[in-house]
Amino acid sequence: AQTVTQSQPEMSVQEAETVTLSCTYDTSESDYYLFWYKQPPSRQMILVIRQEAYKQQNATENRFSVNFQKAAKSFSLKISDSQLGDAAMYFCAYRATLSGNTPLVFGKGTRLSVIA
Amino acid sequence: DTEVTQTPKHLVMGMTNKKSLKCEQHMGHRAMYWYKQKAKKPPELMFVYSYEKLSINESVPSRFSPECPNSSLLNLHLHALQPEDSALYLCASNPRSAGGTEAFFGQGTRLTVV
């Protein structure tokens, strides 16, 4: 069974600084997708960034980028120029590249605080 | 329209009540999910519907009864719940064709059982 581990229950960062959230996963599959979701107090799970395992290039979305190390099964999220609105719960998630009804496997989450 | 809409946003119900949660999407997605989320925890999968048929039931108690009347609508019928069932209930959807696409989530229904 696939598992996703986030070893940092809580993190904090100063506004405008950079922070990295860690995620490791375990799978025997060779092809899969990895995601970072953000859940602010408004409760809605919002996709931050997605990485296809077959792509060597790390995904980036504006201030958000990942460091994907497939051999090490590591998928960290870097947030640059942190803003107050980045404060939220961040979940790392895995999905096997199977049929569309394959559910996501979530890590336990990292709560990020941004200090003004 | 790239939204998953859940109603109601908040629900308080007694242990003898019957209520329903509703989830709607008009993106043509053929996979829809119900998740339960306790405070400070990740979402836990409850049910998966694929092409309007129940494909995964994660051993959820029968007091939770899902229904998918059509490709756009997903319901969760609640009956004789317990206080420990109080949680945020999230609905999500995925396109059927591409396994790697992200799930789109609704804002959830905050359920309190008294």
Image (cartoon, coloured by chain):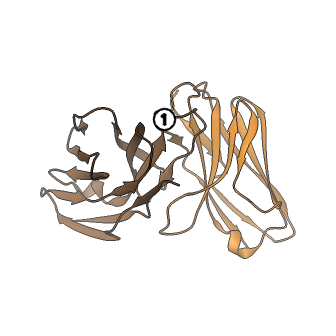
x and y percentages locating residue A69 in the rendered image: 25, 47
Near-viewer residue (B15 or A29): A29
Near-viewer residue (B95 or B70): B95
Residue type, mark 1 in image:
Thr
* Residue located at (80% from left, 70% from top): B14
Q: Colour of chain A?
A: brown
* Residue located at (35% from left, 39% from top): A50
Chain bearing mark 1? A
Q: Name the image quarter holding the C terminus of chain B.
A: bottom right
x and y percentages locating residue A99 in the rendered image: 58, 32
Quarter occupied by residue A18: bottom left
Left or right for A14, reference A94: left
The residue singled out by tag 1 in the image is A97
Q: Dot 1: what SS?
A: loop
> Which chain is orange in the rendering?
B
Near-viewer residue (A35 or B106): A35
Q: Is residue B35 visible?
A: yes
x and y percentages locating residue B72 in the rendered image: 68, 30
Above or below: residue A86 compared with residue B2: below
